[in-house]
Image (cartoon, helix red, strand yellow):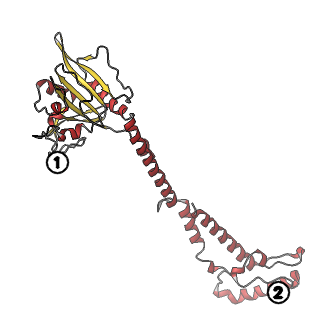
């Protein structure tokens, strides 16, 4: 429980949106309405990961349908440093004729926290083009030609309350091989976005709820005590009492052997007369016959301090009663916990 509470923010899976912005596209409708994938965009997707068939896919699906094909037939997936990443590629999500907003696509990309934008042209990308309460960061990649090498220029834009995150962009921010940098930047971007005001409030509420559940579960376990068969102290204590005595009704004289009853009775009667005549002179009080009235004050005690003696029967009864009474008090005390 404590581990679950402590690690509820740590997720091994991530999902990111991927948009393609062609030249002269400035609106959300234009960007989400792209259907054709250019060779440049396909090459960009191959850098991110591999194209997988969603039908029957067993990895992290990122909210995509892997049974009925309602979110398209393909997606881009990869694993990076022990983390699974699913990309919501706009051109691979279902396209709806007559819907300028393309809600089937925006339903997934608009609920992502970080999105990648692949630019095909010189048209600048504005972060407020895609309307969303969840999107907090955009990483924009634009292909550039350097002499005989082809590289990509990377830029990052995020909301003001998102703390800075690494890895730091070089100067100039141009890469020929940027897969490692790009995936690390995406993961760190999402983790950093959780510290923004909107997500931090949700996190605080979630942690408070988890803490309350943890406290309630531990309190319940404390009341239940050790599980059955665990050999806990309370269970062992109950078992010891059951073995030691079946009932308080058994208090009294120990069982006698039938074969020597008459002989022992005569010897006992003779000894009793001798004690009465020699030690107490008949001044001892008799112990009560009612066992519930048996206590220290009612034990047979000689009125002469110099000749004080306890009858064997009374002493045995008192010791057994006192022992069981003491153990019962301990058991009642333990039940409170």
Crowding around mark 2 (Cα neighbors within 10 Å: few <14, some 14 to 19, many 20+) is few
Taking 282 as reference, is 77 above or below it?
Answer: above
**Is the C terminus in the top left, top right, bottom left or bottom right quadrant?**
bottom right
Residue at 37%, 26% in the rendered image:
165
Q: Is residue 134 left or right of residue 206?
A: left
Q: Can residue 329 be seen in this view?
A: yes
Instruction: Please tell me in which quadrant of the rendered image residue 327 appears.
Output: bottom right
Q: How many marks?
A: 2
Would you call the spot at circle 1 few (<14 residues within 10 Å), some (14-19), or many (20 or more)? few
Reading the image, the residue beneath label 1 is 67
Residue at disc 1, secondary structure: loop
Gap between marks 1 and 2 measured at Cα: 98 Å
Helix, strand or loop at disc 2?
helix
Q: Is 67 positioned to the left or the right of 285 in the image?
A: left
Asked if one can make out residue 1 in the rendered structure from this viewpoint, the answer is no
Q: Label 2 belongs to which residue?
A: 273
Mark 1 or mark 2: whose residue is earlier in sequence: 1
Percent of width and height locating residue 65: 19, 45
On residue 151, the disc is none
**Residue 216 at x, y = what percent?**
47, 54
The quadrant in which residue 158 appears is: top left
The residue lying at 23 percent from left, 39 percent from top is: 108
Near-viewer residue (66 or 271):
66
Q: Residue at x 38, y 40 (%)?
A: 9
Q: What residue is rendered at 18% in x and 32% in y?
A: 50
Closest to the camera, between mark 1 and mark 2, is: 1
Residue 98: x and y in percent read 10, 40
């Amino acid at each position: 429980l404590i581990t679950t509470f402590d690690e509820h923010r740590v997720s091994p899976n991530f999902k990111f949106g991927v948009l393609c912005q062609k030249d002269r596209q400035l609106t959300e409708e234009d960007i989400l309405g792209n259907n054709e994938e250019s060779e440049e965009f396909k090459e960009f997707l191959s850098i991110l990961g591999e194209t997988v068939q969603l039908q029957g896919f067993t990895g992290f699906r990122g909210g995509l349908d892997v049974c009925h094909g309602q979110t398209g037939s393909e997606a881009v997936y990869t694993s990076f440093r022990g983390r699974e990443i699913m990309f919501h590629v706009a051109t691979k999500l279902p396209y709806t004729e007559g819907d300028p907003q393309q809600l089937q696509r925006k339903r997934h990309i608009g609920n992502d926290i970080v999105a990648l934008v692949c630019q095909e042209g010189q048209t600048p990308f504005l972060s407020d083009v895609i309307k969303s309460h969840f999107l907090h960061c955009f990483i924009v990649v634009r292909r550039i030609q350097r002499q005989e090498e082809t590289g990509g220029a990377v830029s990052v834009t995020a909301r003001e309350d998102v703390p800075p995150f690494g890895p730091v962009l070089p100067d100039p921010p141009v890469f020929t091989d940027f897969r490692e940098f790009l995936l690390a930047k995406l993961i760190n971007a999402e983790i950093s976005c959780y510290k923004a005001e909107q997500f931090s409030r949700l996190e605080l509420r979630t942690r408070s709820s988890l803490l309350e559940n943890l406290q309630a579960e531990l309190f319940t376990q404390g009341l239940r005590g050790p599980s059955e068969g665990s050999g806990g102290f309370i269970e062992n204590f109950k078992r010891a009492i059951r073995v030691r005595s079946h009932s308080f009704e058994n208090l009294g004289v120990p069982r006698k052997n039938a074969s020597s009853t008459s002989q022992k009775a005569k010897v006992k009667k003779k000894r009793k007369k001798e004690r009465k005549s020699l030690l107490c002179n008949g001044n001892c009080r008799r112990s009560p016959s009612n066992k519930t009235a048996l206590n220290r004050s009612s034990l047979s005690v000689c009125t002469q301090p110099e000749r004080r003696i306890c009858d064997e029967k009374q002493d045995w009864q008192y010791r057994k009663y006192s022992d069981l009474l003491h153990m019962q008090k301990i058991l009642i005390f333990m039940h409170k916990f």
